[in-house]
């Protein structure tokens, strides 16, 4: 059995039985030596000495037993015991646990402040998942004076009256979280080390060279954090962050290339089960690796490497109709009254929609798909509405394409994400079921809210535009019915202008007037012919065509 002694700083010093007996033997030998120097006057005095010693030992044993019996029923921690400098004398284990937790919770909820060159960085110990093993420390405190033999326990109890004992609970923290916070601190230092970095800007890879700077000595800072949180005399003074100067790593162009390089992926599909796997473009340097390395040999803060897109052999839009077995919706409009330019614009816009595939969750943008309406793109000038006036511009007529698509999308029960009605009513779709577009704004957008990809097929034949949506029917497929009607009229007004070509008193109708309108549109879902829902799509207001009359001034 080991005898456990605590020093003033609560450090236990074990003394083995062998050392105790050795010390006792030395004392006896010293006494024998003294006895030898005294010439006994007679053998009769030896029994008396032995008897006295035995009586003394018996008395000590009795007193020790009585002392032990007096403490045997004590359920509290003995006097003179502290945990992390917090006195727990004469407390039950539960009382001590409560007291220690309350004190340590204050520490865990007090900010740790780190400083470096007048920069401050604050964190809470709880962010590091710091934890004290209070239960273990309380058990040790309670066991003191109880876990030895009767003499050792009595000695420990008496010892604490003169030498106070402190117990430090074991302490843990999440090292990964600590490393992450240290990394954040490193990145925020104004004089910190800057490693080389890169970004992709359009068709260029821009590499920024690194700069030398200070970095935190992680192990030292971790030790300082632990020392602070386990100190008996806890304080909230800031911690001066230990740093060292480092040079940045050299730019590894091979590593950067491997990170940005991407092979193109061809699209394909399967039938059992039906599934479409979309294509994706790849990316690569537009110069050789050796040329890129030579570029880095020059001293510069930034380096620009041109990039090129790698295209797949089979795009998603190239996938055949056999991957889209079901017709989800079809809608057609006529443009028989359109002139040649308007007809050209409608056919061109339709061709840009044709074959477009949308994966589940993907959003479609009419403007992004059709592109800017310019002469170089093949569009012609035709009648358009602009700022409440009838005029001409490139792409006139393509609103019929967006409105036809809108009706097909509604019938396929897809999610509309952006739709704006025309300024004036149009004749090619029912009131309230149109969708105007213009480069820049407004735009018509919808999302493939189904679980399977969809494909748009747009055709123009005999001055009739047809847009169909193909895909795979859901397990529960609703019938869609659209209802729209006029709810009110917006009267037109007469606007007068002057015309120097007309004589005074003469007038001329420049533009005939027509009333505007208000409307409501609903989407009705049916299952087996029975209505299950009715959703308001929009409440629209269409402006009137004001009558314009010119008055002569000549």
Image: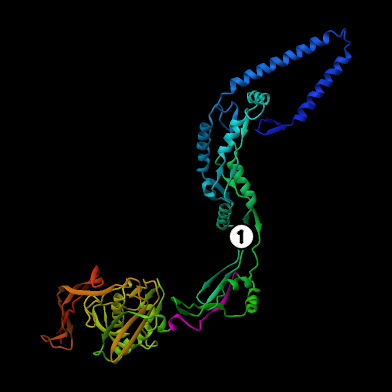
Q: Is residue 348 left or right of residue 50?
A: left
Image coordinates for residue 125, horizontal then vertical, percent: 53, 46
Q: Residue at x 63, y 50 (%)?
A: 242
| Circle 1 SS class | loop
Residue 307 position in % (x across, y down): 55, 78
Crowding near the residue tagged with mark 1, few <14, some 14–19, many ≥20 C-alpha atoms within 10 Å: many
Residue where numbered disc 1 is placed: 193
Query: Residue 189 or 28: which is nearer the viewer?
Result: 28
Residue 10 horizontal side relative to residue 355, left or right: right
**Magenta stretch holds residue 17:** no
The percent position of residue 261, horizontal first and vertical second, equals 57, 75
The residue stretch that appears in magenta? 301-319
Residue 545 left/right relative to 275: left
Q: How is the image coloured?
A: rainbow
Measured from the top left, where is residue 316 in percent x and y?
45, 80
**Figure quadrant of the N terminus:** top right
Instruction: Please determine whether, in this image, residue 348 is positioned above or below residue 226.
Output: below
Vertical placement of 489 versus 182: above or below? below
**Residue 196 shows in the view:** yes
The residue at the point 48 percent across, 83 percent down is 314
The C terminus - image quarter: bottom left
């Amino acid at each position: 059995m080991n005898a456990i002694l605590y020093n003033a700083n609560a450090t236990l010093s074990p003394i083995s039985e062998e050392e105790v007996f050795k010390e006792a033997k030395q004392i006896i030998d010293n006494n024998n030596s003294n006895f030898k120097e005294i010439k006994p006057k007679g053998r009769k005095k030896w029994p008396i000495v032995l008897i006295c010693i035995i009586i003394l030992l018996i008395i000590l044993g009795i007193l020790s037993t009585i002392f032990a019996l007096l403490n045997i029923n004590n359920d509290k921690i003995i006097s003179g015991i502290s945990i992390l400098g917090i006195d727990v004398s004469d407390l039950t284990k539960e009382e001590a646990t409560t007291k220690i937790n309350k004190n340590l919770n204050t520490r865990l909820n007090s900010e740790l402040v780190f400083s470096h060159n007048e920069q401050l960085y604050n964190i809470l110990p709880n962010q590091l998942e710091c934890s004290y093993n209070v239960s273990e420390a309380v058990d040790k405190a309670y066991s003191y004076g109880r876990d030895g033999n009767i003499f050792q326990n009595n000695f420990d109890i008496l010892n604490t009256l003169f030498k106070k004992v402190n117990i430090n609970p074991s302490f843990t923290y999440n090292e990964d979280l600590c490393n992450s916070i240290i990394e954040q601190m490193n990145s925020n230092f104004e004089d910190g080390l800057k490693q080389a970095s890169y970004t992709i800007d359009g068709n260029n890879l821009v590499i920024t060279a690194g700069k030398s700077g200070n970095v935190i000595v992680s192990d030292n800072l971790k030790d300082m954090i632990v020392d602070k949180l386990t100190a008996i005399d806890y304080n909230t003074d800031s911690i001066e962050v230990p740093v060292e100067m480092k040079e940045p790593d050299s730019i590894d162009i091979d590593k950067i290339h491997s990170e940005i390089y991407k092979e193109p992926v061809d699209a394909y599909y399967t039938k059992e089960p039906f599934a479409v796997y979309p294509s994706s473009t790849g990316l690569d340097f537009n110069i050789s690796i050796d040329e890129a390395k030579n570029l880095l040999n020059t001293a510069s803060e930034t380096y620009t490497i041109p990039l090129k897109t790698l295209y797949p052999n089979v795009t998603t839009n190239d996938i055949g109709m056999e991957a889209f077995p079901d017709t989800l919706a079809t809608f057609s409009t006529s443009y028989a009254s359109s002139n040649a330019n308007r007809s050209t614009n409608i056919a061109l816009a339709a061709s840009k929609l044709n074959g477009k595939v949308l994966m589940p969750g993907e959003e479609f943008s009419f403007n992004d798909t059709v592109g800017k309406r310019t002469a170089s793109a093949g569009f012609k000038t035709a009648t358009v509405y602009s700022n409440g006036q009838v005029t001409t511009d490139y792409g006139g007529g393509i609103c019929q394409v967006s409105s036809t698509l809108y009706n097909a999308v509604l019938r396929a029960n897809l999610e509309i994400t952006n739709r704006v009605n025309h300024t004036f009513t149009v004749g090619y779709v029912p009131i309230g079921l149109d969708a105007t577009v213009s480069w820049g704004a407004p735009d018509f957008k919808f999302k493939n809210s189904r679980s399977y990809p969809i494909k748009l097929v747009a055709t123009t034949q005999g001055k009739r535009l047809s847009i169909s949506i193909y895909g795979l029917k859901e397990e529960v497929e609703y019938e869609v019915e659209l209802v729209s009607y006029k709810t009110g009229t917006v009267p037109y007004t007469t606007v007068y202008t002057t015309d120097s070509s007309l004589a005074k008193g003469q007038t001329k109708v420049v533009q005939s007037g027509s009333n505007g309108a208000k409307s409501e549109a609903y989407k009705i879902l049916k299952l087996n012919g029975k209505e299950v829902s009715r959703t308001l799509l929009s409440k629209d207001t269409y402006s009137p065509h004001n009558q314009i009359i010119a008055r002569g001034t000549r």
